[in-house]
Every structure is written in structure tokens, then in C-alpha cells.
Image (tube, rainbow, N blue to C red):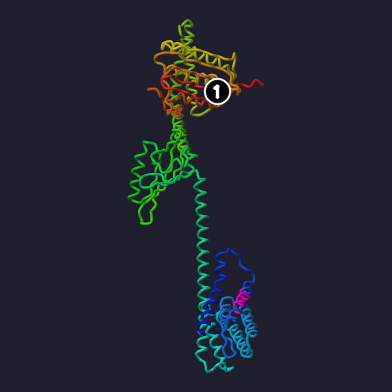
Amino acid sequence: MYLFDYIVNLSIFSLFVNAPMVIRSFMNLKPLQHQRIWAGLYAGVVSVLLVLLSVKQQGYVYDLRYAPVILMYAYLGPISGLITGGFALVMRLYSSGNWLPAIGGWALIMLVCSIVHVYFKRLGFTPLKRSIAYSGVYTVLYLVTVVVFHILVDRPFFHFQYLLFVVLGVILGGVLIETNERLLRIIADRERMEKTLAASESQYRLIADHTSDLIMVMDKNNMIRYCSPSHEHVLGYPSEELGCTALYRIVYHEDAQIIKDTMNSMFKRNKSHAMELRFQHKDGRLIAFDSLCKPVEGEHGEIEHIVMISRDISERKKAEEILLQSEKLSVVGELAAGIAHEIRNPLTTIKGFLQLYKAEDPSMKYNDILLEELERIEIITSELLTMAKPQAAAQYMTDVKELIEHTVAFLTPQALMNNIVFKRNYGEDSLLITCVRTQMQQVFLNILKNAIEAMPNGGEIDIYLRQEPSGECLIAIRDQGCGIPDELFHRLGQPFYSLKEKGTGLGLMISHKIIKQYHGSIAYKSKLNEGTLVEIRLPLHSRA
């Protein structure tokens, strides 16, 4: 019968130990202030209920009320233990007689437990080990109380049974507390890991979504499994459109085989690889990228994916071209200086003899024409020296219409020989610019000569002159020649680059430099086999 009563007490005690911890696991409650006091009060209530379920034997009450007292001492210290013990003592005195052994035993247990608490703490015992140690202390103190007050001395099995269930209650309560605490720690660690993982994923997502670099993940079949949103900004393709499609869709067809061989090699050798690729924009233009490919291993150590990070190097390519062009210009300048210096010496001799012949025979035919052309050669050599070492030249107000007419008159014989006719369309009577006359004449001469040479079968060259609403002077020259391919526009004006078989590319280069010097601009529009339109814009002379 007693055994059944103890089992009922033990079960109820286990329920009350578990209840607050289960509630806490389901409800995200803030930690209580003065936790030791509140826990002592709750454990006191539990001990009261255990006293109500006590076993009575010859006027004595036996129950598990000291199990929550021991647990409070072990986990929260003397304050909680004394509060719980106070509740247990009051209820014990209220429910039964024999007050002297009850009060004496209680006082002894509280005193000794409070003293040994300091010792256990110094030893560094865990709460569960302290619970077992307190159970041993309680067993000794209980036996001392039984002997001192002669409580059922002839019933040792009864006492053994009682102590066994108290110790079992303490151990069971400790195990339940430790299990719940461990479970809460696991849950807290998991939540912390999930938050850390979410924060890390958010940071990586933030980088991937806002970087200008292209990030792609590809599988063994070279299919795109992920592409960053930057693809839409850089290449014009939304991420959804590129998902689960072949990489070759956006790679330029000439580079497709290179990247295919590279990918196959990486899946076999597990080595990163860097290369330059050309990706095709959605509108068809090509963009150069510096790409770094890195293999990623799966769970079984095999390469499952390749991550490709690509950076747009268009600006770097342009900078390299500008640097190369600068170096070419430097070489051209040095060559021009040397050539001009060598030409000037014999030129001076020829000019001197012509002037001498003119003085001896003023009627000599074509003498003036020869002298004018020699002066022109001198001007050209001076421009070559200027290209090598720019010098300040006097600028004057010049009528663009008059300048064009003078150039056209000079080229008319060559145009007639090629069955070419100049057509003028001047929108204004007079458009004035500030320039060095010979330099601008050289610009018009170069462009008109190129137009003539582009029309071996003859045709018309239209010359338009008008004032733009922006206040600039527009000179447009349109021919009916062979035209210029679109992919070669960006190379016009570069030194040593020419579409003519025997051209040097220096004419347009000098023209570009002169127009830039006057804060103007030059633009080209062309269609193959239809002709080319050259538009020059120059700031007009201020009349203020």
C-alpha cells in the first residue's frame, strides 16, 4: 500500500517539476526578475501538495516534500531552498502532530544544507551532482533524526523505503530539469544558428544583388543554375530568362569552344581558371569580361558546379587603346619632326633658286604658282613640327564659306578628272569662326580628298553649311562612295590606320587633333555602298 502511495507521490512530483519547463518551451517568456524567490515559492507550493498526499504511520507523516527542497538547494541556492523548506514545514505542522521531531529535523537539515552549499560550490559540482550530494546529506541527517527522536526504530524497511523514494524523487527531478535545460540549449543554439545563417545568407544576397560583377553557377552540362541580377543591368537579360539555359546563349560564338573546353577541363582537374570572354548583350553588341571560374565540390567530393565571376573590362580596354594610341602619336611626332627638318633644308634651296629666277626673268611662266605651292609645303612641314611640339599660332576670324570655297577650287581639277561634281548648299551668308586659316583648310582638304578617293566611278559630293540652334557652325560633307563598315568607326582618326591601300591614317589623325584644338567635334555616318556623311561642328566667333 505504501509503495503505491509513494509511486503516486513520485508521479505527481515529476509532473510538477516538468510543468513550468514545458510551458516555458512553448511560450517565449522573458526571464523573471528575482528568479530564486519565484522558483522557491513555486517549489514551496509543490511541497505543500506533496504533504497533502503524504503517508501517515503512527502519527508521523512521510512524503516527498524534501525532494523539491533539495533540488532548490542544488540548482538555485539556500534562498530558494529555505523558502521551499518553510512552506513544507508549515504544511507539515498544520497537517499532523509530533511537532518536535519535525521542527528539529527541519532545522538541522536547513542548517547543514546551507553550510555545505558553500563547500559544494567551491568544488565546482554541476547542479545534478549537487543534487546527489544533497541527497546523501539528507539521508544522513534523516537517520540522525530517527535515532535521536526514536521514530519507528523497529521499522527499518519503512525508513529505507521512504529514503529510497526521496532520493529517487531528487534524481528524477534532476534528470528532468537537466533534460529540459539541454533541450532548451539545443533549441536556442539552433535558433541562433538559423539567425546567423539567415544573416549570412542575407549578406551574401545583398552582395550578389547589388554587385556590378556577373555571378553565375553552372552544372556539368554547362547549364546556368543561378545568375545574379546584375546580368539584367549589364547584359539586358533578366535572371528568370537565363535560368536553366545554356551558357553559350550569351557567350560570343567565337569564344564558345574555348569556354566549353575550359569547363570540361575544370570538372576533371578541379582547378580554378581565369580568362577573357566576350559576352553578347541582348541588343547584339559585344562586351569584354575578365572571368574567374572556380569549381565547387559536392557532398561526395566530386565537382558538381562551377561558379563564374565576370567583371566588365570595357573601360580598361578603352584605356589600353588610348595608351596605345598615345604611344603611336608620340612615335608619329618624333617621325614628323625628323621628316619636317629634313624637308625644310632642300625646300629652302629650291625656293631661293625660284626667287632668283623670278628676279632675272619676271616673265617666267608658272613661277608664282610654284612659289605658292612651295609656301604650302612649308606650312605642311610646320604643321608636322607642331604635331611633334605644339606651338602657339595666331588665330584670326575666318569665314567658313570662303575657306571651303578656296579648298574646293583647289581640288576641282582632281574632282573633274574623276568625274566628280561638288554641290554646295550654304544656309547662311557668312559664318565666322576663330582659327588658324591654314589648319582648317588642311582639315577640309583631308576630308574632301578622302571623299574623292572613295568614289572611283564618279558622282556627287554635297557640302552643307549652316548654323545650329546650339550656336555652332555645322559643316556636313556627304559622298557617294563605298562607305565604312560599322565595326571600323571607332578606329577612324587613329595613327597608321587607313581604309585606303596606300594610306597612312595621318590625315584624319591631324584633322581630329585640329578640330579638338578648337573645341569642336567630328562625327561619321556611313552605309556600305551608299556613301559616308562627315559632320564637323565648330563654335562660332563671338560678336560681342
Q: Where residue 397 sits in the image (x, y, percent)?
A: 60, 19
- Label 1 neighbour load within 10 Å: few <14, some 14-19, many 20+: many
Q: Is residue 334 above or below residue 461?
A: below
Q: Nearer the viewer, residue 463 or 62?
A: 62
Q: Is residue 273 above or below residue 180?
A: above
Q: Which residue is mark 1?
A: 537
> Looking at the image, is 138 positioned above or below residue 147?
above
Residue sitting at the far front: 1
Q: Nearer the viewer, residue 504 or 245?
A: 245
Q: Nearer the viewer, residue 128 or 508?
A: 128
Foreground pick, 188 / 492:
188
- Could you say whether the residue bearing mark 1 is in a helix, strand or loop? strand
Question: In the image, residue 161 lies at what x, y percent?
Answer: 50, 86
**Left or right: where 281 falls relative to 97:** left
Q: Is residue 381 magenta?
A: no
For the C terminus, the quadrant is: top right
In the image, taking residue 118 as reference, residue 295 lies left or right, namely left
Point 45% across, 6% down: residue = 365
Residue, far right: 544
Residue at 50 percent of width and 60 percent of height: 193
Magenta stretch, residue numbers:
39-47
Amino acid, disc 1: Arg
Q: Quadrant of residue 141?
A: bottom right
Q: Is residue 2 visible?
A: yes
Q: Position of residue 430 (x, y in %)?
A: 59, 15
